[in-house]
Amino acid sequence: MSATPAPGGPVEKVNLAEKLELLHEYWSPKIVGELNDSHVKLVKFKGEFVWHFHEREDELFLVLRGRLLMKFRDREVRIKEGEFIIVPRGVEHLPVAEEEVHVVLLEPKTTLNTGNVENERTIHQLERL
Ligand code: NI
């Protein structure tokens, strides 16, 4: 795949607009790069996800387009284009997209999208774009 650093190998750039055109499903993150023990993922959100937390992983959500509402049990945070939020491990969260939102995720390779919850939204094997 592209954007995978190999020792001494070619360095490739990633064009997010091009990758976004290949994304047709909501809530289905695709891997667009990796560094150290983390994946860089691209995802489109629309609607409401599921309450969950990640036992061991912190998650970064960088909003490229639209507005993401991140609900926590005690508050809500709106993340606009050009802003990011880091959800620490162990903190329950519910991503909500009142309209379509495009997001870059940066998180450890072990991260499961639904965290501690296993349901029809859970994706174990992520595709690479
Ligand atoms: Ni999460």
Image (tube, helix red, strand yellow):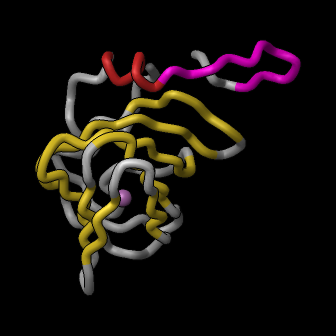
Magenta segment's dominant SS is loop
Q: Position of residue 87 (x, y in %)?
A: 44, 67
Number of callouts in the render? 0
Residue located at (18% from left, 52% from top):
97
The magenta-colored residue range is 5-15
Q: Which of the image's four quarters has the C terminus?
A: top left
Q: Which of the image's four quarters has the N terminus?
A: top right
Residue located at (18% from left, 40% from top):
100
Q: Nearer the viewer, residue 82 or 129?
A: 82
Vertical relation: 105 (above or below) 55: above
Q: Nearer the viewer, residue 73 or 52?
A: 73
| Residue 38 forms part of the magenta stretch | no
| Residue 12 forms part of the magenta stretch | yes
Q: Position of residue 71 (x, y in %)?
A: 24, 71
Seen in the image, is 34 located left or right of residue 17?
right
Q: Position of residue 19 (x, y in %)?
A: 41, 20
Residue located at (36% from left, 49% from top):
81
Vertical relation: 5 (above or below) 1: below
Vertical relation: 126 (above or below) 75: above
Q: Position of residue 7 (x, y in %)?
A: 85, 23
Seen in the image, is 37 located left or right of residue 6?
left
Residue located at (44% from left, 49% from top):
82
Tell me which corner region of the image, top left, top right, bottom left or bottom right, holds residue 66: top left
- Determine if residue 122 is in view: yes
Seen in the image, is 68 located left or right of residue 2?
left
Vertical relation: 38 (above or below) 88: above
Q: Quadrant of ligand 1?
A: bottom left
- Determine if residue 125 is in view: no
